[in-house]
Amino acid sequence: METQLDPATLDGLTIVLLVAGLATTGVIAGVLAGLLGVGGGIVIVPVLFWVLTLLNVAPEYASHLAVATSLATIVPTSISSMRSHARRGTVDRPLLRLWGPGVFAGALAGGLLAKVVSGGDLRAIFGVVALVVAVNMAIPKTLVIQDHLPVRAWVNRTIAGVIGVISALMGIGGGTLSVPTLSAFSFPPHRAVGTAAALGLLIAVPGVAGFIWAGWGIDDLPPGSLGYVSLPAAALIAPMSFLCAPLGARLAHALNPANLKRAFALFLAITALRMLTA
């Protein structure tokens, strides 16, 4: 197994390129989150995985670090987004009460599963689900299952739990999976996006806790790691993503959203295939 890079072996140019690369990742993730309403994690995870592998971090650890660090960056972003949506009245509190516990429990289970799930399995989960999301984004017509949410509470909580588990294992927030799911049940779009921001926090916090526990005590992780969370990477990515999300929201009003979604769907499909073949 490959050993981790010693910071003392990095020259000045490499460090500058690394910092610039991570900051740029945050910019792209923030802009896309505001522009398309997708979680920044769908961008952060593959980019961070490639950055870590370029730095000779073992792929088994790189996958876990990428997912866990992505979840850590979602915490401040989701808090800001949730507060913004709450001021506009688009956070559906009854839905949050119905789905919240299931999402939280599922995300915690996903984080804890990182102890036994291999890096290859994490990449496979990300790649397959990202392909599904890409196809969903590329299809012009929204899939509709029925004109209301399931009546039975246990069905709703099961759906929420599955979303929590998959999101935590992918390192993504609430929007990527919950918004299309709610749209399939004819839930109002603005309320779906607003509530997804709150669900993102309920995914990120327990997911991060689980990944910290799963990676605790592993000696070969890069310096500055808290379990599987890379604190230096999170410190570089999170502020840029936080600051650039409003820019993406403004651009969304000036650009054609249909063309942007198709372009991003293509990018996501290529990214997913690369993760599957990594």
Image (cartoon, rainbow, N blue to C red):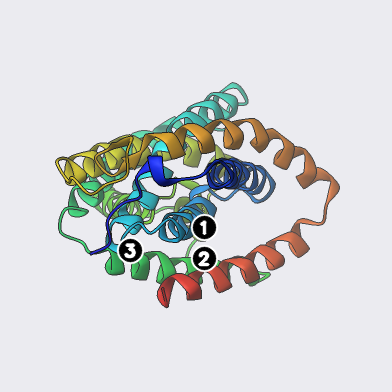
Callout 1, which amino acid? Pro
Q: Which residue is mark 2?
A: 133
Q: Is 153 placed left or right of 112 in the picture?
A: right
Instruction: Say which label, 1 or 3, has the lower sequence index.
Output: 3
- Residue at image position (18%, 48%) is 112
Q: Are marks 2 and 3 in contact (CB under 8 Å)?
A: no
Q: Which residue is mark 3?
A: 59
Q: Quadrant of the N terminus?
A: bottom left
Quarter in which the C terminus is drawn? bottom left
Q: Residue 72 sits in which quadrant?
A: top left
User: Percent position (x, y) of residue 29?
Assistant: 59, 46
Q: Secondary structure at mark 1?
A: helix
> Judging from the image, what secondary structure is the residue with disc 2 in?
helix
Nearer to us of marks 2 and 3 is 3
Looking at the image, do the residues carrying marks 1 and 3 touch, with CB atoms under 8 Å apart? no
Q: Is residue 188 visible?
A: no
Please indicate, yes or no, whether residue 197 appears anywhere in the rendered image: yes
Q: Identify the amino acid type marked 2.
A: Val
Direction right: furthest residue: 254
Label 1, on which residue? 180
Q: Residue 182 location in percent, x, y?
A: 48, 53
Q: In the image, what residue occupies the spot 73% across and 37% down?
A: 247
